[in-house]
Image (cartoon, coloured by chain):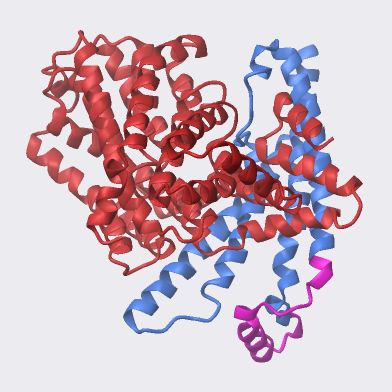
Chain colours: A blue, B red
């Protein structure tokens, strides 16, 4: 269980960290270029936004796994520790269901008009596909690729909540043994 | 149904953002057209689809890097040179270190955590009670999001069109310093244990070295805020420069950050930002529902019919935000209430910049009030004195902050003088 949790934590942290690093690098370099050579890339604003949305979705799952979310604890603090832990296990189940529903919602959203071009990324996507010869890279320029972040975020949240739930159950069993 | 899911979820300890999303998903999933499950994802995506919003993760990253590079001790040493020898010196250093920290991170919670770890044990050693030290640390952290750069200011400017970030940044400077002065006077009048001379012992560094050590971190807010105010860069670009500067200090100047630590810092910054940004996304989706049902219009009409005086409106707003701040996280409260209250404030003749700072100041006070005062939680986590004792200890500071809020409300010049003087 610990191995699986650690793998998930690393995966979520990798997604969140990579997104943060790319967002910083793109905005910083693009700003420098604008103020030094007077030029900036066409995707310099749109791409960081989309990367941030993906980063938030990985961060959402990571924060859940590490219990970092803002929550209202004034009532739960009054409960005995064992009851509280059982309640939090129920919360994990609710969060799992929320994650699954959010994944469906995100899928429905991205499927609707996902084939449309993202205005700032169109030329970059075409260039990537042309120069690499990989036609699939044209999807970089489609809004659906980025809109799908919500669906993936929902799925990641569901995984995080499930892992947290299993972790609690195993700690209950360990305490009982 | 939607309220039942939301309230039960919040009471059970479901994270705030997830409770809002769950309530919306249940409502939209069970509702008929135009409601559908897809709307939740659509509106969440729209809520995050904004370039200015990227300033938030970048400022959080700048703060994380600055913390990692060990600037906290330099800031404390710097503040100690300035105010450490006055009466209640250590308490004053705590307050003014928060003022300096405010210019670096803009996050009250980060301030409580960084300064509290050093000050709460140190103040106890110098005869202060532990609850007092924890309460002062939490209370002075409120200055963080008021003095620029400030994450709530960026969010406020995103919600309200026509209010510029530079004007709000400038408008926050005097209120932040005013709060520090009032807190300082309060501790100087009430503290009996520390006559100031001992505070110097905390940091044995010579004054010159301490001042030099503080200058490099202090250049960051000057540079960042200055470039935004001069219109050279946007807040998001300035935030990326702040990260670059913080990395330069941490990696090359102080050499406290190894390159191998960068992936962790990037991941932690995005994780901490996502906690804020997911609330923004969730509340954006909730706002769609409110707007679709014309709730803001109905509330505006009702308020304009029943409240015809600017003073009455401002008093009602203060009380409303103080009350809401008890139960709702500040950014979520701002996202829900500001779109409704801002047009009313403007139609009653309240300056938009003045109103913005009042709202932010008001909600930041909520950071130190139970049951959802985040700074209070962090301070309690460090001090371990129990929430009841800490709540009792923070009451006088809460009163001081409300007093400053009243001054800011009824003397608008304290807020709008500086932006006006700078041409905004």
x%, y% of residue B12?
Answer: 73, 25
Residue ID at (31%, 23%): B119
x%, y% of residue B199?
Answer: 17, 21
Q: Is residue B308 left or right of residue B77?
A: right
Q: Is residue A120 above or below residue B300?
A: below
Residue ID at (40%, 12%): B393
Residue ID at (84%, 44%): B27
Magenta-colored stretch includes residue A88: no
**Quadrant holding the N terminus of chain B:** top right
Q: Is residue B237 above or below residue B338?
A: below
Q: Is residue B65 above or below residue B116?
A: below
Confirm whether residue B261 shows in the render: no
Name the residue nearer the viewer: B260 or B402. Answer: B402
Q: Is residue A15 left or right of residue B55?
A: right
Q: Identify the image quadrant of residue B404.
A: top left
Q: Is residue B85 above or below residue A104?
A: above
Number of marks drawn = 0
**Quadrant holding the C terminus of chain B:** bottom left
Extent of the magenta region: A110-136
The main secondary structure of the magenta stretch is helix
Q: Identify the image quadrant of residue B45.
A: bottom right
Magenta-colored stretch includes residue A118: yes
Confirm whether residue B34 shows in the render: yes
x%, y% of residue A44?
Answer: 51, 74
């Amino acid at each position: 269980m610990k191995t699986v949790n650690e793998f998930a934590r690393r995966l979520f942290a990798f997604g969140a960290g990579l997104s943060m690093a790319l967002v910083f690098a793109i905005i910083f370099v693009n700003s420098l270029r604008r103020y030094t050579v007077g030029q900036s890339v066409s995707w310099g604003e749109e791409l960081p936004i989309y990367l941030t949305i993906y980063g938030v979705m990985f961060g959402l799952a990571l924060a859940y796994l590490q219990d970092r979310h803002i929550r209202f604890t004034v009532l739960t603090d009054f409960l005995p520790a064992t009851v509280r832990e059982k309640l939090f296990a129920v919360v994990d189940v609710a969060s799992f269901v929320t994650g699954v529903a959010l994944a469906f919602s995100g899928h429905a959203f991205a499927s609707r008009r996902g084939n449309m071009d993202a205005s700032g990324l169109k030329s970059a996507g075409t260039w990537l596909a042309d120069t690499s010869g990989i036609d699939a890279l044209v999807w970089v320029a489609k809004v659906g690729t980025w809109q799908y972040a919500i669906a993936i975020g929902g799925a990641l949240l569901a995984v995080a909540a499930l892992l947290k739930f299993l972790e609690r159950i195993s700690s209950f069993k360990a305490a009982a043994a | 149904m939607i309220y039942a899911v939301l309230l039960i979820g919040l009471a059970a300890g479901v994270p705030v953002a997830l409770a809002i999303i769950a309530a919306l998903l249940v409502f939209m999933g069970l509702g008929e057209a135009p409601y559908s499950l897809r709307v939740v994802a659509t509106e969440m995506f729209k809520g995050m689809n904004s370039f200015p919003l990227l300033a938030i993760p970048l400022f959080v990253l700048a703060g994380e890097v600055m913390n990692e590079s060990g600037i906290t001790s330099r800031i404390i040493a710097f503040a100690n040179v300035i105010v450490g020898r006055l009466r209640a010196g250590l308490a004053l250093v705590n307050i003014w270190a928060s003022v300096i920290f405010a210019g670096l991170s803009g996050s009250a919670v980060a301030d409580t955590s960084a300064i509290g770890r050093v000050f709460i044990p140190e103040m106890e050693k110098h005869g202060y009670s532990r609850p007092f030290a924890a309460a002062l640390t939490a209370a002075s952290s409120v200055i963080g999001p008021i003095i620029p750069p400030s994450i709530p200011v960026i969010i406020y400017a995103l919600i309200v069109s026509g209010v510029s970030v530079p004007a709000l940044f400038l408008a926050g400077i005097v209120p932040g310093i005013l709060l520090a002065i009032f807190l300082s006077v309060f501790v100087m009048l009430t503290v009996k244990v520390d006559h100031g001379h001992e505070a110097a012992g905390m940091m044995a560094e010579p004054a010159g070295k301490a001042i030099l050590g503080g200058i490099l971190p202090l250049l960051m807010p000057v540079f960042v805020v200055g470039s935004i105010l001069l219109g050279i860069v946007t807040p998001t670009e300035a935030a990326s420069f702040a990260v670059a500067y913080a990395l330069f200090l941490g990696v090359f100047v102080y050499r406290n950050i190894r390159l191998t630590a960068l992936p962790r810092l990037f991941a932690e910054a995005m994780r901490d930002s996502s906690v804020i940004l997911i609330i923004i996304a969730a509340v954006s989706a909730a706002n769609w529902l409110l707007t679709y049902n014309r709730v803001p219009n109905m509330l505006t009409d009702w308020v304009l019919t029943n409240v015809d005086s600017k003073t009455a409106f401002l008093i009602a707003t203060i009380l409303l935000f103080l009350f809401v701040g008890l139960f709702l996280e500040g950014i979520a409260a701002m996202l829900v209430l500001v779109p409704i209250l801002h047009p009313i404030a403007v139609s009653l003749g309240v300056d938009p910049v003045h109103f913005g700072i009042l709202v932010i100041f008001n909600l930041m006070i909520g950071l130190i009030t139970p049951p959802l005062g985040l700074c209070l939680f962090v301070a309690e986590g460090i001090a371990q004195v129990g929430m009841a004792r800490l709540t009792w200890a923070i009451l006088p500071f809460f009163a001081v902050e409300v007093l400053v809020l009243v001054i800011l409300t009824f003397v608008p010049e304290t807020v709008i003088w500086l932006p006006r003087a700078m041409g905004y």
